[in-house]
Amino acid sequence: MSNADIQKGWRWLATLDTETALESLLRDGFVVPYEPWPRELPTYGVPQRDGIWVPELRTWKELGIPLKELAPGTRASMVGPVEEDGGSLLQYLIARRRVVESTIPIAEKEEQLRVLRDRPQFADVVARLGTMLDATITEQTGNWRAEYARVTEFRAFVAAIGYRGRGVSALFDAGLRTREQIASASDQQLRSLPGIGPKTLLAIRSAIATDH
């Protein structure tokens, strides 16, 4: 059944949260022309978590009905109802995710997040977030440092056994990202990955045994 008479498109509605991916936040409010379901629409960020497509309805004027247009409403967010367009919270989240998803050093990321917190244009956002804001910065920094430590340990481990090239990415893609995960993998699972033959497998098992 087509709703083309009342629906003119589909609008991307980003989830207003500090964990939402930058690409989703940047697409907030983006409208694609209407086509009835089923149709394939792009997904930005993590499906169902970072945003959804919602119907974009025609205005009273577009429908030829002489009524006063509805006033802008509100939408849900991590701090409760906010302006329909996301207001200053959306702008803060975009600025924040630019820092979070950048490749600058961790200490510099942490400093930039605190600079954002002190910007006058985000004073209302900071007030609504309250102590949650500093908690999210601390948590984010902790996650970065933990991930950096895991990656550093992983790289040292694979370098010690002489495992290089595309095989390292294959381990990551297979979800084997720590010594413990690699140790728990079966020989068959490891041998199925690029670059792991009998000698490399033996080196992996020996390195793990030596470490323990």
Image: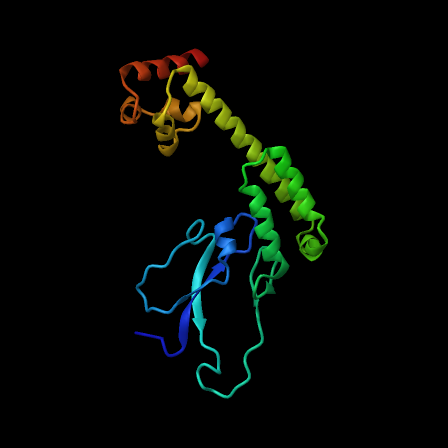
Left or right: residue 38 compared with residue 33: left
Quadrant of the rendered image containing residue 99 = top right
Residue located at (52% from left, 54% from top): 25
In percent of width and height, residue 2 lies at: 32, 74
Query: In this view of the protein, which residue sits in the foreground, 205 or 158?
Result: 158
| Front in this rendered view, residue 101 or 144 | 101
Using residue 52 as the reference point, say whether residue 145 is left or right of it. right
Which one is in front, 46 or 165?
165
x%, y% of residue 80?
A: 60, 60
- Position of 188 relative to 91 (above/below): above
Q: Is residue 212 visible?
A: no
Asked where in the image residue 165 lies, by quadrant, the reply is top left
Seen in the picture, residue 156 relative to 108 is either above or below; the reply is above
Which is nearer the eye, 70 or 121? 121
| Residue 30 percent location from the top left of the image | 47, 62
Residue at x 36% of width, y 75% of height:
3
